[in-house]
Amino acid sequence: MTRAIRLLRRRLVGSVFVLLIVVIGSFLLLEAAPGDAVDAYIVSTGGDAGMIELLRHRWGLDQSELTRLANYLWALLHLDLGQSVTFSRPIRDVILERLPTTLILMGSATALSFGLGSALGIYAGARPGSFRDRFLSIGSLALYAVPGFWLGLVLIVVFAVDLRWLPIGGIETIASAKTGLARAGDIATHLVLPVSALGFIYLALYLRMMRAGMAEAWRQDFVLAARARGLPRRRLVLAHVARNALLPLVTMLGLQSAQMLGGSVVIESVFAVPGLGRLAQEAVAGRDTPLLLGIILVSAVLVIVINLLVDLAYAFLDPRVGAGEAGA
Amino acid sequence: MKRLHRFFQTPEAIAGALILALLVIMALAAPLLFPGDPQAIAGPALLSPFQHWSLPLGTDRLGRDVLAELFHGARTSLAVGLTAAAAALLVGAVVGTMAGFAGGLIDEVLMRITDAFQTVPSFLLALAFVSIVGPSLGVVIAAIALGAWTGPARVARAEVLSIRERDYVAGARVIGMHPLEIAFREVLPNALPPVLALSSVIVAAAILTEAALSFLGLGDPNRVTWGGMIAEGRTVLRTAPFLSIVPGIALVLTVLGVYLAGEGVVESTAVRRSLS
């Protein structure tokens, strides 16, 4: 496992720099926002000019920009994201409360788009140029052109308003006092539509990548050799062609995580799912800039962690990764 | 002409070109066919489509002409999509060229910044940027470009890395050209084709991002946007779903047209390359 540890170490060092740039960037955005934490505090509590001065001094807001940046970094090192204006609570607590919902939503949507997308991609790529290949290629392009929030609304109109099969929004039935499995089932039915809206958009991406990779692999010598050995077609398609096209999809899984997080903002707003994305919209509506930037920082950390995990999975799947740097 | 001929060989490319042509006509004709404010009240509220000859697509919750809004929305979508994509391609090409050509510390710093921008979900970044600076057309364009320049930057850098070792670059050095002049007059133009190949994807993403921003109420309040129309219709989703469905179909067709035309361009140039 030393290969994985080496990879992890190199990635972690790079991640620290990236995170530092994100932090400085969000500090600059915070500075650019009109008003500061004292203004926001005074709006909710009221107070005179003398009190404003006192608070500015006490919170270190009358110091130079560099000192404030240092204070900001110091607070972040202690995992202190500041105080939310709209919720009047520590930002960290608010975000941690919303995070699991978004992770469930993202995880399920990723599983749906990756699973179904690569399966359909294999189906299309098994016979490049055939009717089903062309049909799926055009169909996936059309699907990729659909805005997620609009697909969500259409799903609501069809399945929640007309057919009444599924709930219109929210994460669980309010005041139903369900526990255990019944509650899990309730949450699952609430998640069917948002997960579909989020997952179906990205399904097209995996389908197209899988198909393109397979079309490429069919032209390779090893496939010709496998064919010459008289391998059954099913085995040829799955174990040779599709398997070789699968690796780039794993990389895509990491790259897409940032997109998925961004997409969940609108989807969560459409379906009123109380997750991180909906929180971002609430922060915008409440002009709560520190909360919004806290969400951005947490998302950046989340994306870095997901990409680290994907890299480790990739190293596990492809023995060539990291092996060449034994001396480094 | 030959290239144009090659472009129109696949049915996909023809469909894409037709959709885009229709869209451009809609955008250009909007002020002629529907002069005056598209946000003005034109008839009774919530008129269904195909009920009245002067209001073919009906009216929304406030009695505004849906067809006029649709035409004027095409203007916003196209303007934002094309400008934001052009800005992203320009910034990306310049940053990528500088990183690839300079190498060393400059390369390292620029690429770490690129990494940072790719780590933050671009939609969240756009959301934060617009909500802090305030919604207007220019700010929305800047916000979208802010999250879209990283792809072109990476592609440009990779291309420049291979170009800077070529003989004509060495020649330019020998005759004493300034490094900046070499980078932007000799290297950048030659690194552009693969960067420009990204444009259809970036235009499409920009149109979708603009729609999502205005859906969340962060579009320019003085302009009609398809995303804003969908959000408006959402309040009467149970009784008048067509108000959300119609602008959504326009969005899907637009983005699909951009994709199809983009594929046509890539395919026609790929043929050209394999022939030469």
Image (cartoon, coloured by chain):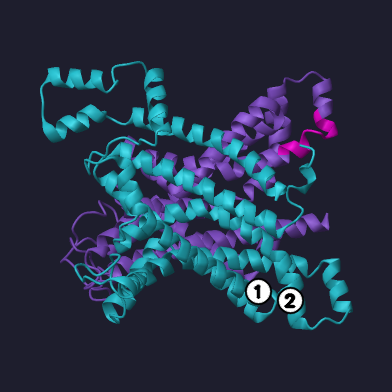
| Region of the chain picked out in magenta, as a range | B160-169
Residue at the (76%, 20%) spot, across then down: B177
Q: Colour of chain A?
A: cyan
Answer left or right for B110 relative to B231.
right
Q: In the image, what residue type sits under mark 2?
A: Val
Q: Is residue A267 visible?
A: yes
The x and y percentages for residue B53 are: 25, 73
In the picture of the structure, the residue carrying the numbered disc 1 is: A122
User: Is B128 above or below relative to A181?
Assistant: above
Q: Is residue B220 visible?
A: no
For the C terminus of chain B, which image quadrant?
A: bottom right
Residue at the (70%, 29%) spot, across then down: B103
Most foreground residue, B236 or A220: A220
The x and y percentages for residue B218 are: 32, 47
Pointer 2 chain: A
Most foreground residue, B165 or B176: B165
Mark 1 packing: few (<14 Cα in 10 Å), some, or many (20+)? many
User: Under tag 1, what secondary structure?
Assistant: helix
Most foreground residue, A222 or B50: A222
In the picture of the structure, the residue carrying the numbered disc 2 is: A237
Residue A310 found in image quarter: bottom right
Magenta stretch, main secondary structure class: helix
Chain coloured purple in the rendered structure: B
Q: In the image, what residue type sits under mark 1?
A: Ile
Answer left or right for A139 relative to A23.
right
User: Is A80 above or below relative to A280?
Assistant: above
Pointer 1 chain: A
The x and y percentages for residue A244 are: 73, 65
Q: CA distance from mark 1 to mark 2?
A: 8 Å
